[in-house]
Amino acid sequence: MKALAEQWFVNMSPDFTGDIRLLCIPNAGGGPALFRTWSQQLDPEIGVYSALLPGQASRLREIPPTETDVLVEQMIHASEAYLDEPFALFGYSMGALIAFEMARYLRRHGLPQPLALFIGARRAPQLTDLLSPLHQLPDAQFVQAVQSRYGGMPLAILQDAEMMALFTPILRANFAMIESYQYTEEAPFDFPILAFGGTRDRTTNESQLRAWSQHTRSNFDCQIFDGEHFFIQQHQDAVIVQIRQSLQPYIR
């Protein structure tokens, strides 16, 4: 089971020995690079583990799922070896939706629950998506639309036709998954939720972020930073400070 967990979650904290695992799920098309320096800024008792999804890096030849339920079930199965100690979930953009559904899956199946759920750059799941779907657009239009709406696509990929040919089907599969997502109502969680957003994010506004409050009976907070969809690139330190403060009471 540990080998499977290591395939799906990259240990970004090689010196970690306990107390809390922070399982991080990146944005569509993203990977562990988003979290590469987090362990340096968190307490040594908090280990950072980043999801490595099918189609990314060493898993490039794997076909990414296009259904949320499929990916969530695969990730839960893979992460079981990491649920033996307290853990929290952090999801960014697409990853926020996956982290949310992972927590609901764990509860439905009587498995351990996270200490907290951290959300970045994603509207609450019960809200209707008012943006036009992108995943069925022709390749060039699809890439252009994603970059215009979200930004953040590395220039090295945009300017390399061969890399774009590899990257576009993976990104398209990720978008097919989140754009076909169907929300079903369940009871709110008993753990806290902390949401982060950018003032100029074209995909998510503060009201849509604050709607995450409906999903917890515990504490909720929403932190808004100056920036666009990938505000975390400029405000990573501030986001990590908030996460550290939220998890501090659980460190033994």
Image: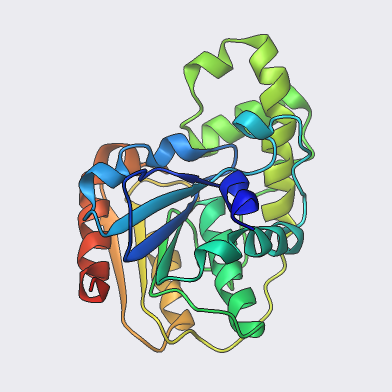
Q: Quadrant of the N terminus?
A: bottom right
Give the percent coordinates (x, y) of residue 168. Answer: 70, 28
Q: Is residue 238 above or below residue 19?
A: above
Quadrant of the image occupied by residue 184: bottom right
Classify residue 239 as left or right of residue 52.
left
Q: Is residue 191 above or below residue 202?
A: below
Give the percent coordinates (x, y) of residue 227. Answer: 31, 42
Seen at 63% across and 44% down, the residue is 53
Quadrant of the image occupied by residue 28: top right
Q: Is residue 76 above or below residue 153?
A: below
Give the percent coordinates (x, y) of residue 6. Answer: 57, 47
Could you tell me how many numbered marks the image carries? 0
Q: How is the image coloured?
A: rainbow
Is residue 159 in sight in this rendering? yes
Q: Quadrant of the C terminus?
A: bottom left
Give the percent coordinates (x, y) of residue 189. Answer: 48, 84
Is residue 227 in sight in this rendering? no
Seen at 55% across and 30% down, the residue is 147
Which residue is at the front of the view, 121 or 26?
Answer: 26
Seen at 67% across and 72% down, the residue is 183
Seen at 33% across and 57% down, the residue is 17
Which residue is at the front of the view, 70 or 160?
Answer: 70
Classify residue 113 as left or right of residue 67.
left
